[in-house]
Image (cartoon, rainbow, N blue to C red):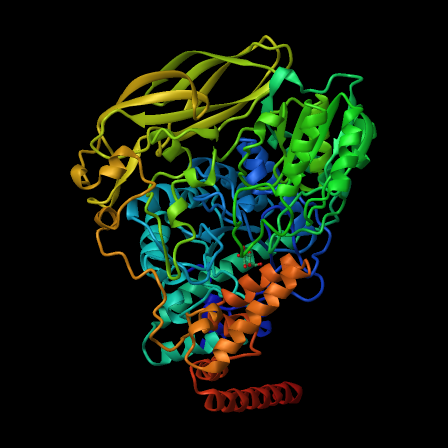
């Protein structure tokens, strides 16, 4: 142990006290020994250090900080060095705001396009997500503070995220859902990791010995700290045993006492606690050291400009018929769409940043050199169809050479705690597009949102630019691409299906009441579309440029590939070359191709560059469920270099020596997996894959409600009180939606309905403790008065105890 001397001086109670927060954002201090609290703050694309009251919903503003483009956006740059740059700038701001642990990046896979937090995650591909995130982590930690990669693991939806049980086979878990985390540990050297809220194959991730011990600590050799999701701790002692050092936020000492009791009763050995304290002290001391040097304010303007650069490199040009872009000098442009006036630049929830500066399109027009003849909103962001606004927009569009149409999703649609209901851009915006098309067919749509959307209307636009969520300078960055000052170089980090129904997890998202079954196994995103030969709107890795590139001369050797990349157009540009590998043998089912490397290259017009992409320990591996190890199948592999997953420019066969492992599957029993057509896998076949019976997917309505049941389950509570409470919440939500308060109604889903009962105690910082919670459960389970008495009695005890400890403190 590194801090043995310190630990020896601590009482058992002091050691346990370190294991949970002091308040919402800080760790516990021990004044007597000079151990200070450290500060944790969101988040992934800007610091959210809350100045006033803390909350986890992003309701109270944070101190002003640069809002960088979100992870979904930066992933489109396919530039891990750019990710590192973002990390460095984030880290500098964290230092300036005295934040020791930055709660990000988030590397969960985009299993389904409707996940409400896709805007905060990088990709549907673990390799790309891992490489980008490792860059962020290196950047953040270069300042001596800690990143906190989240949410570990298999948390790929927001619906019932605090209770849902993810049912997934071990190979898929390893190859898809853990690989990005593995890269963050291996290459990013992250100092902390946040466990997720959900269960994984029956056990809360925070208590999952296989995940936390076998894989994270033993296999990956992780020596850093594990922090719970906010309010995500279930059984504290079990969590500690699994290696969770820090529970957040505070439970006012209640769970620390559970640790002390467990040690006193022999349930837990004191050594486990000592080791956890040792690792936490390392986080505290090492990040505190970062503040030893003098720290000034950060340069707000400079950070704003960097954020603009990052956005510029992440914008994706999706369509450019008749080379309508870049805009030709002197063209008269009509600007339409409410998003041009009020930029949509970030998501909602815990990642929300209070920006230092905020660019809006209409304010940046002058400097762009584009000649605007006027602006019309055309629709109301949160409203219904408005014919008058449409007519006014059409009148303007008639007079223009080109229409720039700014559309997207509103802030309430992409949020922490909530999934999207569909993949559509709201009807009132599409009504506008259709009306505009009648008067002017030169339409360029600019989309602002953080996730994939359907585009049945795409035939009505000639140009299409996807800005994703470009951060506080995103609006200016888009104008620079439109004007041609910047040559777009972003490529999609996720596939765009033609229709939501085409997604492989369509039938199993967001699962039933208790579980979500990952029946599609390895085949998410392009891994599915490509293998099952399902047409998409835009493939993974796709993006256009104002120039063109030619790929030639592929050479493969034991260590990697080399090829020539030539800019055959008339202007400088950047190309993202992608390395995919597919196996020619069909002994083990696999996607047709998988991303194994990529490189972003800048090339001047007419020039060529020699590009090398090395192989690494992930190039040929697969996880063998028989040997329970990573293995290599001895076979010929197709090595592909593509401009996207669907546009392979060069390919060559390569023989890789194997590890001689036994074949893990009986092929005839897994026909869907061998064909890749996994959109309708039967129960039997899925059970064959996971090697056990599928757990009951629905709530058990016969039992009284317990700690891990959600408040939504009060709808069938045995007592009238529970049912009345449930229906009152539902009515309030309906009312809020009716009066246009959609966002508040949504927050009720996450913070009330989907909250498990234990969350009441875990999230109220000691205002409600576990004995009071027992009383509440009695009330909802049909023992109203007995429960009420218990709540009242326990509250009185709590108040008395608090008064006594205050008085003791005063005496001392
Ligand atoms: C979110 C985390 C966040 C934490 C603290 C949770 O609800 O899921 O991503 O870091 O709150 O705000």
Q: Specify the quadrant of the image occupied by residue 707.
A: bottom left
Q: Quadrant of the N terminus?
A: bottom left
Q: Specify the quadrant of the image occupied by residue 324.
A: top right
Up the image or down, 254 lies above or below 543; here it is: below
Residue, x 45% and y 63% (percent of image)? 245
Residue, x 43% and y 41% (percent of image)? 501
Up the image or down, 567 lies above or below 632; here it is: above
Please state the total of marks drawn on the protein image.
0
Seen in the image, is 45 located left or right of residue 165?
right
Between 198 and 567, the residue placed more toward the observer is 198
| Quadrant containing ligand 1 | bottom right
Provide residue 421's location: percent of width, then percent of height. Answer: 52, 50
Query: Is residue 76 visible to the viewer in this orientation of the structure?
Result: yes
Provide residue 178's location: percent of width, then percent of height. Answer: 39, 46
Seen in the image, is 699 located left or right of residue 230?
left
Up the image or down, 598 lies above or below 158; here it is: above
Between 118 and 730, the residue placed more toward the observer is 730
Query: Is residue 359 visible to the viewer in this orientation of the structure?
Result: no
Q: Quadrant of the C terminus?
A: bottom right
Provide residue 140's location: percent of width, then percent of height. Answer: 58, 45
Up the image or down, 516 lies above or below 84; here it is: below
Provide residue 692's location: percent of width, then percent of height. Answer: 22, 55
């Amino acid at each position: 142990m590194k801090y043995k001397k310190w630990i020896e001086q601590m009482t058992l109670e002091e050691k346990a006290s370190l294991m949970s927060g002091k308040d919402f954002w800080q760790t516990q201090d021990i004044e007597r020994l000079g151990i200070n609290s450290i500060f944790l703050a969101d988040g992934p694309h800007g610091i959210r250090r809350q100045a006033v009251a803390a909350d986890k919903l992003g309701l109270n503003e944070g101190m002003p900080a640069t809002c960088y483009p979100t992870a979904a956006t930066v992933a489109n740059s396919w530039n891990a060095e750019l990710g590192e740059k973002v990390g460095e700038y984030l880290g500098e701001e964290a230092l300036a705001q005295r934040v020791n642990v930055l709660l990000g990046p988030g590397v969960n896979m985009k299993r389904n396009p409707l996940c409400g937090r896709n805007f905060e995650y990088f990709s549907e591909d673990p390799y790309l997500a891992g490489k980008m995130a490792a860059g962020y982590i290196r950047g953040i930690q270069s300042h001596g503070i800690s990143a906190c990669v989240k949410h570990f693991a298999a948390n790929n939806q927001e619906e019932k995220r605090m209770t849902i049980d993810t049912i997934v086979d071990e190979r898929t878990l390893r190859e898809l859902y853990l690989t990005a985390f593995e890269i963050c540990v291996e290459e990013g050297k992250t100092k902390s990791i946040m466990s997720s809220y959900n269960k994984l194959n029956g056990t809360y991730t925070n208590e999952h010995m296989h995940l936390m011990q076998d894989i994270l600590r033993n296999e990956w050799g992780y020596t850093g700290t594990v922090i719970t999701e906010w309010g995500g701790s279930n059984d504290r002692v079990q969590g500690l045993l699994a290696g969770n050092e820090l529970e957040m936020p505070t439970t006012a000492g209640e769970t620390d006492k559970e640790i002390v009791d467990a040690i006193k009763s022999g349930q837990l050995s004191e050594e486990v606690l000592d080791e956890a304290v040792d690792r936490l002290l390392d986080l505290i001391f090492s990040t505190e050291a970062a503040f030893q040097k003098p720290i000034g304010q950060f340069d707000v303007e400079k950070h704003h400009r960097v954020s603009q650069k990052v956005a510029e490199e992440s914008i994706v040009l999706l369509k450019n018929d008749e080379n309508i872009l870049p805009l030709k000098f002197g063209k008269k442009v009509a600007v339409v769409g409410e998003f041009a006036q009020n930029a949509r630049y970030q998501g909602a929830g815990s990642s929300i940043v209070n920006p230092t500066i905020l660019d809006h399109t209409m304010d940046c027009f002058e400097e762009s050199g584009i000649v605007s003849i006027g602006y019309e909103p055309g629709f109301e962001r949160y409203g219904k169809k408005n014919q008058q606004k449409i007519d006014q927009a059409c009148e303007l569009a008639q007079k223009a050479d080109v229409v720039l149409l700014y559309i997207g999703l509103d802030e309430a649609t992409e949020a922490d705690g909530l999934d999207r209901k569909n993949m559509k851009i709201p009807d009132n915006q599409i009504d506008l597009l259709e009306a505009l098309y009648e008067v002017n067919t030169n339409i360029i749509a600019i989309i602002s949102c953080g996730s994939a959307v359907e585009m049945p209307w795409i035939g009505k636009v000639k140009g299409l630019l996807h800005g994703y969520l470009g951060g506080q300078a995103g609006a200016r960055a888009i104008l620079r691409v439109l004007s041609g000052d910047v040559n777009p170089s972003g490529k999609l980090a996720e596939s765009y299906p033609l229709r939501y129904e085409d997604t492989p997890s369509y039938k199993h998202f967001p699962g039933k009441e208790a579980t979500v079954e990952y029946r599609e196994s390895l085949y998410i995103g392009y891994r599915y579309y490509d293998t099952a030969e399902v047409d998409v709107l835009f493939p993974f890795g796709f993006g256009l440029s104002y120039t063109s590139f030619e790929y030639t001369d592929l050479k493969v050797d034991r260590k990697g590939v080399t090829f020539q990349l030539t800019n055959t157009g008339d202007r400088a540009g950047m190309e993202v070359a992608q390395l995919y590998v597919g196996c020619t043998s069909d002994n083990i089912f696999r996607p047709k191709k998988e991303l194994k490397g990529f490189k972003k290259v800048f090339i001047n017009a007419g020039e060529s560059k020699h590009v090398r992409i090395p192989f690494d320990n992930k190039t040929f591996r697969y996880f063998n469920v028989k040997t329970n190890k990573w293995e290599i199948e001895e076979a010929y592999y197709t090595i592909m270099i593509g401009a996207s997953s669907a546009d392979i420019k060069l390919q060559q066969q390569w023989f890789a020596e194997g590890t001689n492992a036994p074949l893990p599957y009986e092929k005839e029993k897994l026909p869907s997996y061998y064909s890749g057509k996994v959109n309708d896998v039967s129960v039997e076949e899925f059970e064959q894959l996971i090697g056990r019976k599928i757990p009951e997917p629905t709530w058990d309505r016969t039992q009284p409600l317990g700690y891990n049941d959600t408040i939504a389950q009060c709808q069938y509570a045995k007592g009238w009180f529970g049912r009345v409470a449930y229906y009152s919440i539902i009515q309030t939500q309906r009312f809020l939606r009716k009066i246009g308060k959609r966002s508040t109604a949504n927050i009720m889903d996450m913070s009330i309905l989907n909250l498990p009962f234990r969350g009441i105690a875990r999230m109220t910082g000691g205002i409600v403790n576990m004995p009071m919670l027992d009383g509440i459960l009695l009330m909802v389970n049909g023992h109203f008065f007995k429960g009420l008495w218990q709540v009242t009695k326990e509250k009185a005890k709590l108040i008395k105890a608090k008064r006594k400890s205050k008085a003791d403190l005063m005496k001392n």
